[in-house]
Image (tube, grey):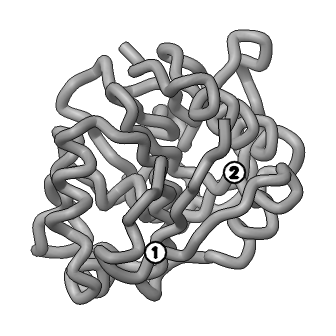
Amino acid sequence: MSLNLGLIDYGMGNLHSVEKCLERLDQDCSLIHNAEDLEGVDALILPGVGAFDPAMANLSATGLVPHLLRWGQEDRPLLGICLGLQLLFEQSDEGSDPGLGLLGGRVSRLPSNRGERIPHMGWAPLKHHGSCPLLSSDAPSEWVYFVHSYAAVPSDRNDLKASAPFGDQEVTAVVWRGRVGACQFHPEKSSDAGEEMLKRWLTWLRNGAEPCP
């Protein structure tokens, strides 16, 4: 099926690298600046780089927030990337503004007593905790690229689909519920492993986007 993919542009995302990765996968995308741009869109990507409160302020300024809330409530396909994952949650230690709340839980600062530098920057392997459109049981420990100082703590453990090591503990790497999901790492900067994940997601969309349990 033909797929109309929207990439949300609210001044906080690394749009160029996402666009280039999608180009390599032969997938066009339209930039979404306001509610009118959502017309005819089948699925959305919410990227993000930066801090939580400025991101929510920028997103609110576009007028998209109520439409994204309805999008999530209708369980339409949406993929968050990095800060885009954090915005799906209810609150963040990084600021005082509420998030979108499409997923239950909050975003917490990475612990500073684990012998790891903050921000957590670089490559780390994934540990799968469930299935979702990004992941494959044939590749259970892909190495992917992270840049973050905060990590989500889902209130529903079933929403956690993959984690990554940080010191002596694991932090959230992939979350998913229904057709709404996100990754804390940057698949567009994660070489072949990241491209394969986005390719799986696109294939899932074209095959009807069955909700993830």
Q: Kindly identify the residue that appears in the image at 50 percent across and 57 percent down.
A: 45
Q: Amino acid at mark 1?
A: Ile
SS state under label 1 = strand
Compared to 65, does 154 lie above or below? above
Which one is in front, 165 or 28? Answer: 28
> At x 48% / y 33%, what residue is drawn?
170
Position of residue 209 measured from the top left corner of the image (x, y, whole percent): 50, 27
Along the viewing direction, whichever of 52 and 164 lies nearer the viewer: 52
Q: Secondary structure at mark 2?
A: helix
Mark 2 Cα-neighbour bin, 10 Å: few <14, some 14–19, many ≥20: many
Q: Image check: 205 left or right of 144?
A: left
The reply to whether callout 2 and callout 1 are in contact (CB within 8 Å) is: no
- Left or right side of 69 for 16: right
Number of callouts: 2
N-terminal-most mark, 2 or 1: 1
Residue 32: give its label.
Answer: 1
Residue 118 in view (yes/no): no
Q: Position of residue 114 (x, y in %)?
A: 48, 47
Decide if residue 58 is on the left or right side of residue 7.
left
Quadrant for the N terminus in the image: top right
Instruction: Look at 49% across and 16% down and name the residue there.
Output: 129
Q: Position of residue 145 (x, y in %)?
A: 71, 53
- Residue position marked by numbered label 2 in the rendering: 187
Q: Residues within 10 Å of mark 1 (few under 14, many from 20)?
A: many
Answer yes or no: is residue 61 visible.
Answer: yes
Q: Which quadrant: the C terminus?
A: top left
Q: For this rendering, which residue is in front, 110 or 94?
A: 94
Question: Residue 173, image x and y in percent?
Answer: 51, 40
Amino acid at pointer 2:
Pro
109 vs 2: above or below: below
